[in-house]
Each structure stands twice: as structure tokens, then as C-alpha cells.
Image (cartoon, grey):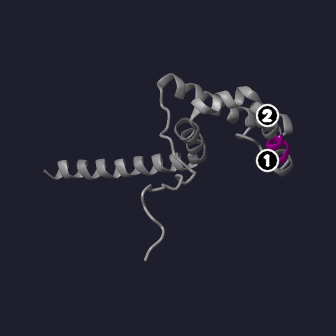
């Protein structure tokens, strides 16, 4: 019976260590997970694709280039990107392009699986006019 209890305690400790490491892994990838979740479930790609096709892709590409340019000025020259890539403008442009590509891939995936998010109204509803109500109170 004592051996069974010790095995159970070891199992609980090992499970706790596993969950702790899993939490740290999730936290280290939290921004990428949030990025993917937003583009997959937060954007209505049925409406976004036609807007991009009408020319909105041009400012999007300019924003990607601008982000890479700013990032290249902020990045330290002695640091390494992903542990092995020198952070030059071109490597950072490739990273920004990959992020944009993952957003577009999420849009494609949303269309394949039909995961259109619920419509959220931002504008207040128009005021309701009640007919037959007289404004002249006595």
C-alpha cells in the first residue's frame, strides 16, 4: 500500500511539472497564439477578401515594409533573430511577411472550414419612432 501511495505522489509531482512546463511553453508563444486566434476567429474574412481585392492590399504591404524598417532600426545589431539569424532589414521583412502570410492563411482556413465569426454591431441602433404617441403632454 505504501508503494502505491509513493507512485501516486510521484505521478502528481510529475503531472505538476508537466503542466508547469506546458504553461511556460504557452506563455512563451502567447503572442503568436493570440495573433493566430485573432486572424482565425476574430476577423470576418468573407468581408475582408473583397476589400483586399479592391486595393486594400497596397496599404497592407506598405505597413509590412514600414514595420520591418522600424523593426530593423530598433533591433540590436549584436542580437540574433530566432537564435541564429542576424536582424537585417531583409530578414525582418521576411519575418513580417511571414506574419502577414499566416494571417492570410488563417483567412483561407476560415473559408475552408466555414468559421465565420458572429457579427458584432458597432453603431448604435437607429432611434425607434413610435407612431401615435403625442408629444404634447398636459
Density class for disc 1 (Cα within 10 Å; few <14, some 14-19, many ≥20) is few
User: What residue occupies the far bottom of the structure in this picture?
Assistant: 138
Q: Secondary structure at mark 1?
A: loop
Q: Which mark is residue 79?
A: 1
Asked if residue 120 lies left or right of residue 78, the reply is left
The residue at 56%/45% (across/down) is 34
Q: Residue furthest left?
A: 1
Callout 2 crowding tier (Cα within 10 Å): few <14, some 14–19, many ≥20 = some
**Camera-side residue of 89 and 60:** 60
Q: Are marks 1 and 2 in contact (CB under 8 Å)?
A: no
Task: Tell me which corner region of the image, top left, top right, bottom left or bottom right, holds residue 52.
Answer: top right
Residue plotted at (51% across, 22% down): 112
Residue at 29% of width from left, 47% of height from top?
11
On screen, 136 above or below 40? below
In this picture, residue 18 sits left or right of residue 6: right
CA–CA distance between discs 1 and 2?
Answer: 26 Å
The disc label shown at residue 61, or none:
2
Q: Is residue 52 above or below residue 80?
A: above
Residue 138 drawn above or below residue 125: below
Provide residue 79's location: percent of width, then percent of height: 79, 47
Of residues 12 and 27, the one nearer the viewer is 27
SS assignment for the magenta stretch, majority: helix
Q: Tell whether position 92 is magenta.
A: no
Q: Can you give x and y, in whole percent of width and height, for residue 55 in the image? A: 77, 29
Front residue of this view, candidates 17 and 133: 133
Give the percent coordinates (x, y) of residue 125.
52, 52
Q: Relative to residue 86, is residue 108 depicted above or below?
A: above
Specify the quadrant that holds the C terminus: bottom left
Q: Which residues are magenta?
A: 66-70
Amino acid at each position: 500500500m505504501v508503494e502505491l501511495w509513493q507512485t501516486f505522489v510521484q505521478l502528481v509531482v510529475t503531472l505538476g511539472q508537466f503542466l508547469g512546463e506546458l504553461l511556460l511553453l504557452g506563455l512563451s508563444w502567447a503572442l503568436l497564439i493570440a495573433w493566430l486566434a485573432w486572424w482565425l476567429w476574430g476577423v470576418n474574412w468573407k468581408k475582408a477578401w473583397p476589400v483586399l481585392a479592391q486595393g486594400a492590399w497596397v496599404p497592407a504591404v506598405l505597413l509590412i515594409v514600414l514595420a520591418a524598417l522600424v523593426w530593423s532600426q530598433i533591433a540590436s545589431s549584436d542580437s540574433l533573430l530566432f537564435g541564429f539569424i542576424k536582424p537585417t532589414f531583409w530578414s525582418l521583412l521576411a519575418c513580417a511577411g511571414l506574419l502577414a502570410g499566416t494571417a492570410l492563411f488563417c483567412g483561407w482556413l476560415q473559408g475552408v472550414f466555414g468559421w465565420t465569426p458572429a457579427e458584432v454591431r458597432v453603431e448604435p441602433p437607429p432611434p425607434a419612432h413610435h407612431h401615435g404617441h403625442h408629444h404634447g403632454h398636459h
